[in-house]
Amino acid sequence: MWSTQMRCAPSLRRPITSAAASSRLPPCWRGVAAIRRPYIVVTAAFKNSRTEKLRTLLSGDEILLGPCCHDALSAKLIEQAGFPYAFMSGFCTSAARLGAPDTGLISYGEMVDTGRYIYETTRNLPVIGDGDTGYGNAMNVKRTVRGYAQAGFAGILIEDQVAPKSCGHVRGKRVVGREEAVSRIRAAVDARDEGADILIVARTDARQAVSLEEALWRAQAFAEAGADVLFIDALESEEEMRAFTELGGAAAAVPKMANMLEGGGKTPIFRPSELQAMGFKLVAYPLSLLGVSIRAMQDALIGLRKGRVPPVEALGNFADIQAAVGFPEYFEEEQRYAISTPTSVPAALPEEAAPEAVAAEEVAPEAVAAEEVAPEAVAAEEVAPEAVAAEEVAPEAVAAEEAAPEAVAAEEAAPDAEAPVVEPEVVAEDRTSTPSDDSATWPLPPESTASTSALYPSVTSSSGSSNSSSSGTGSGADAADDPYYRRNRSLRVRISDVSTGLVKLETRVPAGFLNGLTALIPQVSGFNIEALLEQAMGPEAVRPQAGQPLISIPTGNDMVQIFLE
């Protein structure tokens, strides 16, 4: 929420009345000098409800646990998990956005940009952003604080390292002098007091760069300068942590933050109850999300190199992934703006020709209406062979007496009129070979020759023996040439409005990978898709005619259709 404040410029609060002062003005201004009035300066301040929420949390009795996020999705998951706040770590953001270490490479603009996305995707999660050194001198610090506040951050961390800075738990720590360190915090506090609605987290790295005594002195000085939260990074023992939380003077009443660097940092790991007993108010967990993400991606890539897709236990099903990124909320809100008359032209209107049919007519001119091409091609059974080929390319371009115009649908147009579809290749492993690397951590599905044969009917020969050149990879000559080989086919799923014919969803799923189909379309969960595919693709296949769906399921106002391609 934006609010306005009005104030008088200090140098113009009193009118110029003395003769001496008036004589110094240009002649054109001397007559109006005596009636000069103070002017009004109007400033705008962004009032962030999340900042107020963080202030309220800091004044409570509970210790605040905050995982570190690095992008909008990780922040969204933190909020969904119920944490009271989050910290946008420079270490994690630099790694995720740049693929680079936290050594001062990431810029102010990139950090603010990430913060805006986080603010937009979360509902009411207070986030403290890593402002590093403020990206310059004291004036840069003020601009950084204002920019972070406008991006929606509830707090900003400003530290005393020499630029370029680096992670507080790695070697080579250097800090600026005391005067410059305090000047940065004073500039940040001034920016806050001048209208930037944001809390100032003052950090010192002097423990590793100089000494514990120097770090304690700077924390006290930061408190006297007006910081809202104090933070000494890389403390090495419980005694040092207690010395920090037991500071007196101005620092006594200022909340303290602890950094529990997972995986081997300089600070020992304590339970939240232990940290609260020491006197800490906030706890940051910087690497929990980034670390497990890196390991999970590495394990998944090892498995994919061997042709193994991560199982549902590790991956989750498609519905879970949709829920995590917000599809259900999107569709629910979309219903609020549903319109009764669609703006797109339904494909079933007979008076309007589908553009795809025109394109097909241009691709195959010999399939034009019989009276325009050849008089001898009037009847369907006398159609020229070229028109038959055109019919296979574009079923909607059949002779007028055989194809009702209302059966023409845009989604059944010529394949060359559609965007290319990239489909994953399902690989059948050679079970006789021993993998060179078994470091994948997820549980693998049990071995089953029968299920593999059912899924890939062309891999196993009639005698029951497997061809080592093709069964191991699923890419042999027999498999590539077999029209019934499932990897070469796909299922096209279409959901359309029954009354208007408007297509709401259309997607493709490889016929050899059916696990995600019921998650995508729950309405087909009661059908034996496997049996229908065997009927359409087996040795005694009864394939649907061109344009005829394998399954048609009316569900309320929608029609769910599955086509075999």
Image (cartoon, rainbow, N blue to C red):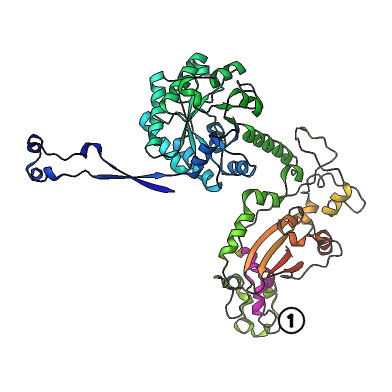
For the point 10% across and 44% down, the residue is 29
Q: Nearer the viewer, residue 40 or 395?
A: 40
Seen from the viewer's position, the closer of residues 184 and 352 is 184
Across and down, in percent, residue 495 comes to 68, 65
Label 1: which residue? Answer: 381
Q: Is residue 403 magenta?
A: yes
**Near-viewer residue (380 or 201):** 201
Q: Is residue 324 left or right of residue 92?
A: right
Residue type beneath disc 1: Glu
Q: Is residue 370 left or right of residue 563?
A: left
Q: Answer whether residue 114 is visible to the viewer in this image.
A: no
Task: Locate residue 561, reporting x and y percent.
Answer: 72, 66
- Please provide percent x and percent y for residue 349: 61, 78
Q: Is residue 67 magenta?
A: no
Residue 96 visible? The answer is: yes
Between 231 and 383, the residue placed more toward the observer is: 231
Q: Is residue 244 above or below residue 514?
A: above
Residue at the image position 83 percent from the left and 68 percent from the top: 542
- Magenta span covers which residues? 389-416
Q: Is residue 98 above or below residue 277?
A: below
